[in-house]
Image: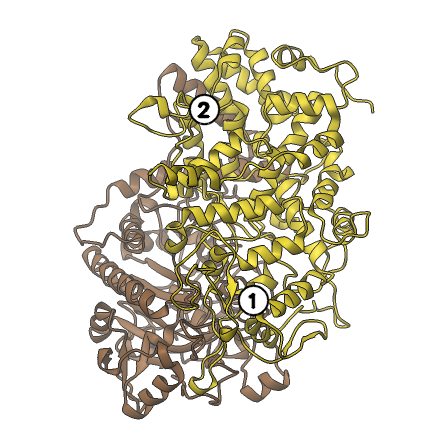
Chain colours: A yellow, B brown
């Protein structure tokens, strides 16, 4: 492959990263851009690695990495008598996101958490940090596994059961006019698997003879599926559907006496026969959804939007859906194949053309904070990450696992008024950008750059960015900005943005102040905000 | 200053609608403006007449179980209610009795957690509207069953139904809200071009989208400024100049331009908003709930209306967490008092500001919920009951048609999912007319309205806001032709989007 390497701005930066071997597979800036898609933010270590071994080998290596689980640290804390609350769960999240062995997996799991949404905005879930971490670990575990297993384990997780209220959902009681809870039945179809309308394999809407979209299910289907998701409750040591001791980090179990008996109609002409166990019913329903042709384009498009671009071409969605349908070895639902297809697709890998006006996506508001932490090796002297993020929902409009509703922080088809809506494009991440978050997030990022990511009376626990290498370059504003360009904007910063930042830096003298201002301005710039 | 920084401050004279001084003036009356009135006279009137109106949307997101907000209390009707609601039924004796001015043969009570709402109702500043919901056209149970009517898209789905309530276009997934469309018609009455007519306390929403200026979001403490922006130290000046440079450039990439506009707009609006609202303090006490704090900020913003140059404003305030598939009784016991207290506190603050007659507050929600129980809660349904408060509200009464609740009644599509008897379109039209949308423009705001209501009728769509007979009509404004620029012709240059 031929790459443009003779970019002068790389010289200074390259001196501060591990030497890229001759014959490197990928240029540093291409590696950096790849990592804006494949991780929660590029850092030097991964830029160097991708440059050296290339995309494919990097992916294979990531697929084989050990998993950076979030629950163990909480169990460890609980084991030594420490408090384990919602805060400690976030600390564990940050530790794995910054230091975990599996940056690709952490990226995909976060994307999955914005599809299979649960939220600690609900007090029950906020009060169960170990269960919530276990739920996140379930997403991590299946990130490169099979979608069917993911859908089943999500369905059976007590955190999801509490969030969408199928935990302790009972069979109907005709004598009292009671019916099964429809909540999970609806959202598993609308949000987790097939969506509202029949899709073509490229993700575009199928239409009937009158040009109208074709619903995938109606309310009668929901009442049927609601019967399926009855009888699940905690896998308690004292098994009791109604009063068993809550166990939040093991799958729910079936209590068949509370499961709706009889046949149930599934989608697309299928039925479950009467007389099956509850768990057989659930497996049949999961299979019924899993086999629906919508899943590949539905889930594929959502993952493309989170990782690469808001407006993938139908061809791109089609190629990813094809990988979902068959991983090349005849297996349906292999998410490793889906992730590989998303990241290696020509549409993801083509170097962005400056003439394009709608490629890429807005960086998720909160992920700017994560990227800074990763890019500048945020850490504390105590090697802990006690980051509270208590203001993040207000400042950034989002915080992982704190969505206001099961519909996530933003809808996949959201389009802000103005040129994006006028062009009939989608830009989901803009839904959390408003006149409060646009400014408050910039202030919060500045605090992160200038000071720390948390406030601790004992400053050995304050998590700070390490700007040492940048400060060393600060006497040369151009060299400083070029280094930041490669790390933060994958060497794609325009000459005019670069000049504005350089001019500002040159008005200051203190190297630390120069560095902090440069990082702030790059991160605030529209060219950083939009990943192309 | 770049091209995009130039504000379109051309007065859109022809789009102004002169609506008179009497805030409780007839919803049913024909609002006209005379082209004979010159602009200066209009402006003079505007600045001195107190011509100001605000609509406050309290969006109860998640779909409130509103058949436990307003409950029939007569023995026979209560027995039906208790039978269908089973374990979700409120005790008959717990309900707070209310007496609607217009008898319908039933007696009613409010949830025990809403004494403040009952007081507002009794004092004539709160009305209830029964069984409102999204409809594409009038719908009977037979038509629903044989699918001979067009139904709202995505019936019973949160995202779709919340969108339809906010767009009033239930047969399309429209991103344009009815406040956004009102802004197209009335936004130019406001002299401030940095701050939209539409202000959100809850971020992005459909209700206020689609207008010429995107809604302006504030928080419970008002607007936010960028730290050190505009400061005088060397460092602050370097920072400010660079920020201005980065946000002032023209970007070819639509996403970059949208992002730059969002930040630029926020900085510009804060300059006006922050100082104007800082000067308004209220003595009315508010509870320390997020809803109350948001409504206090709305009241303070209304208090700053003259400083802000505002004559028409909408406010969007979300109060979420009503999706009670389980724990509906316990949750409502906690949440309805929050709603009730906040509405009363807001009413008191408006009294303190002397603008009760100029502000109407209404509830909206994704949908009502099933009358039947799932053993712990209720599921997604359709029609629901709503609350309207304000000095112009013909309060102390129940509007629309409160349905029978027994299973299998003439509106029951199953499980007690009731077909609405009043459409969102009618509810919106009533509010829009009061807000000052001319009848001739009403269908721009509520495109399907004619399926439920003749926009040229003399009677109001529902009647819960001041009627022609109860308030003076604007005088001496008949006979002159009114010129309105059609939306499609010669649109104003778009100002930078604000968020």
Q: Position of residue A266 (x, y in %)?
A: 66, 73
Contact (Cβ within 8 Å) of mark 1 with mark 2: no
Q: Residue at x 45, y 32 (%)?
A: A442
Q: Position of residue B148 (x, y in %)?
A: 64, 84
Position of residue B438 in the picture relative to residue A324 (left or right):
left
Q: Is residue B374 above or below residue A187?
A: below
Q: Nearer the viewer, residue A327 or B316?
A: A327
Frontmost of labels 1 and 2 is: 2
Residue most extreme to the front: A237
Residue B424 visible in rendering: yes
Q: Check residue A186 in the rendering and tell me which mark sits there, or answer none.
A: 1
Callout 2 secondary element: loop
Q: Nearer the viewer, residue B432 or A372?
A: A372
Q: Residue at x 74, y 44 (%)?
A: A337
Position of residue B32 in the picture relative to residue A101 (left or right):
left
Residue hosting label 2: A379
Label 1 to label 2: alpha-carbon separation: 43 Å
Q: Nearer the viewer, residue B73 or B432?
A: B73
Q: Is residue B196 above or below residue B61?
A: above
Residue A391 visible in rendering: no
Mark 1 or mark 2, which has the lower sequence index?
A: 1
Q: Nearer the viewer, residue B415 or A199?
A: B415
Q: Chain of mark 1?
A: A
Q: Residue at x 68, y 35 (%)?
A: A64
Marks 1 & 2 on one chain: yes
Q: Position of residue B368 (x, y in %)?
A: 44, 73
Neighbour tally class for label 1: few under 14, some 14-19, many 20 plus, Cα within 10 Å: many
Q: Chain of mark 2?
A: A
Callout 1 secondary element: helix
Position of residue A70 in the picture relative to residue A245 (left or right):
right
């Amino acid at each position: 492959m031929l790459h443009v390497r003779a970019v002068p701005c790389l010289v200074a930066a390259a001196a501060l990263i591990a030497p890229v071997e001759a014959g490197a597979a990928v240029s540093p800036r291409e590696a950096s851009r790849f990592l804006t898609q494949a991780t929660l933010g590029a850092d030097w270590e991964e830029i160097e690695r991708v440059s050296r071994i290339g995309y494919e080998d990097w992916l294979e290596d990531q697929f084989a990495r050990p998993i950076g689980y979030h629950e163990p640290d909480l169990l460890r804390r609980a084991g030594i008598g420490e408090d384990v609350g919602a805060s400690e769960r976030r600390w564990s999240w940050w530790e794995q996101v910054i230091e975990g062995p599996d940056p690709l997996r952490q990226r995909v799991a976060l994307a999955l958490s914005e599809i299979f949404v649960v939220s600690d905005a609900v007090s029950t879930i906020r009060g169960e940090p170990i269960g919530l971490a276990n739920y996140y670990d379930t997403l991590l575990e299946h990130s490169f596994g099979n979608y069917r297993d993911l859908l089943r384990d999500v369905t059976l997780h007590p955190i999801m059961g509490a969030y969408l209220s199928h935990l302790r959902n009972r069979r109907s009681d005709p004598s009292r006019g009671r019916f099964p809870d429809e909540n999970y039945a609806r959202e598993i179809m609308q949000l987790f698997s097939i969506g509202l309308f029949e899709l073509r394999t490229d993700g575009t809407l199928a239409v009937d003879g009158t040009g109208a979209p074709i619903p995938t299910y109606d309310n009668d289907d929901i009442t049927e599926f609601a019967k399926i998701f009855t009888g699940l409750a905690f896998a308690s040591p004292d098994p009791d559907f109604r009063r068993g001791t809550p166990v939040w980090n093991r799958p729910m179990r079936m209590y068949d006496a509370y499961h709706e008996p009889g046949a149930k109609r599934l989608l697309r002409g299928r039925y479950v026969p009467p007389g099956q166990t509850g768990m057989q019913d659930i497996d049949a329903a999961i299979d019924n959804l899993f086999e629906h042709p919508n899943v590949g384009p539905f889930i594929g498009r959502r993952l493309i939007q989170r990782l690469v671009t808001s407006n993938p071409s139908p061809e791109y969605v089609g190629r990813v859906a094809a990988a979902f349908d068959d991983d090349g070895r005849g297996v349906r639902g292999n998410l490793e194949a889906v992730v590989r297809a998303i990241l290696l697709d020509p549409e993801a890998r083509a170097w962005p053309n400056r003439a394009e006006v709608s490629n890429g996506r807005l960086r998720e508001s909160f992920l700017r904070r994560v990227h800074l932490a990763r890019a500048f090796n945020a850490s504390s002297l105590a090697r802990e990450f006690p980051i509270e993020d208590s203001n993040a929902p207000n400042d950034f409009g989002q915080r992982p696992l704190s969505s206001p509703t099961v519909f996530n922080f933003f809808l996949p088809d959201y389009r802000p008024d103005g040129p994006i809506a006028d062009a009939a494009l989608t830009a989901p991440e803009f839904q959390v950008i408003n006149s409060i978050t646009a400014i408050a997030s910039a202030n919060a990022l500045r605090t992160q750059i200038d000071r720390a990511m948390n406030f601790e009376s004992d400053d050995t626990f304050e998590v700070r960015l390490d700007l040492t290498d940048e400060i060393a370059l600060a006497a040369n504003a151009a060299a400083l900005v070029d280094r930041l360009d490669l790390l933060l904007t994958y060497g794609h910063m325009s000459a005019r943005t670069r000049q504005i930042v350089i001019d500002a830096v040159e008005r200051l003298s203190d190297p630390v102040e120069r560095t902090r201002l440069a990082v702030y301005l790059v991160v605030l710039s529209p060219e950083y905000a939009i990943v192309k | 200053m770049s091209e995009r920084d130039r504000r379109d401050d051309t007065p859109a004279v022809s789009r102004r609608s002169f609506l008179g001084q009497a805030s409780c003036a007839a919803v049913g009356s024909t609002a006209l403006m005379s082209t004979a009135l010159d602009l200066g006279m209009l402006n003079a009137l505007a600045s001195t007449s107190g011509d100001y109106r605000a609509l406050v949307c309290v969006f109860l997101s998640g779909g409130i179980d509103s058949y436990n907000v307003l409950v029939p209390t007569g023995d026979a009707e209560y027995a039906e209610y208790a039978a269908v609601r089973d374990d979700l039924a409120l005790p008959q004796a717990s309900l707070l009795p209310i007496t609607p001015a217009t008898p319908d043969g039933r007696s009613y009570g409010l949830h025990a957690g809403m004494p403040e709402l009952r007081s507002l109702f009794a004092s004539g500043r709160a009305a209830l509207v029964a069984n409102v919901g999204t409809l594409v056209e009038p719908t009977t149970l037979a038509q629903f069953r044989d699918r001979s009517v067009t139904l709202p898209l995505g019936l019973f789905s949160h995202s779709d139904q919340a969108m339809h309530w906010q767009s009033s276009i239930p047969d399309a997934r429209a991103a344009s809200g009815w406040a956004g469309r009102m802004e197209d018609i009335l936004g130019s009455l406001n002299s401030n071009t940095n701050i939209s007519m539409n202000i959100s306390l809850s971020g992005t929403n459909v209700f206020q989208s689609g207008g010429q200026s995107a809604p302006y979001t504030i928080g419970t403490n008002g607007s936010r400024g960028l730290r050190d922006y505009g400061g005088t130290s060397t460092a602050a000046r370097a920072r400010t100049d660079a920020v201005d440079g980065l946000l002032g450039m023209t970007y070819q990439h639509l996403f970059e331009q949208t992002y730059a506009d969002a930040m630029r707009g926020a900085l510009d609006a804060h300059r006006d908003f922050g100082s104007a609202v800082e000067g308004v303090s209220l003595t009315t006490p508010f509870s320390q709930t997020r809803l109350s704090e948001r409504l206090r900020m709305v009241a303070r913003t209304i208090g700053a209306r003259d400083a802000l140059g505002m004559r028409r404003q909408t406010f969007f305030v979300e109060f979420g967490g009503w999706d009670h598939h389980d724990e509906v009784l316990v949750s409502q016991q906690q949440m309805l008092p929050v709603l009730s207290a906040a509405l009363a506190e807001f009413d008191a603050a408006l009294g303190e500001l002397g603008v009760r007659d100029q502000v109407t507050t209404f509830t909206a929600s994704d949908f009502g919920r099933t009358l039947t129980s799932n053993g712990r809660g209720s599921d997604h349904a359709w029609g629901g009951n709503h609350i309207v408060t304000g000095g112009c509200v013909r309060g102390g009464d129940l509007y629309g048609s409160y349905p029978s609740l027994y299973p299998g009644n003439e509106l029951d599509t199953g499980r007690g999912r009731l077909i609405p008897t009043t459409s969102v379109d009618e509810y919106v039209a009533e509010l829009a007319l009061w807000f000052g949308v001319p009848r001739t423009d009403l269908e721009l705001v509520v495109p399907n309205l004619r399926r439920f209501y003749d926009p040229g009728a003399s009677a109001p769509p529902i009647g819960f806001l001041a009627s022609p007979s109860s308030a003076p009509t604007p005088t001496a404004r008949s006979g002159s032709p009114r010129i309105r620029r059609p939306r499609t012709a010669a649109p104003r240059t778009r100002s930078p989007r604000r968020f």
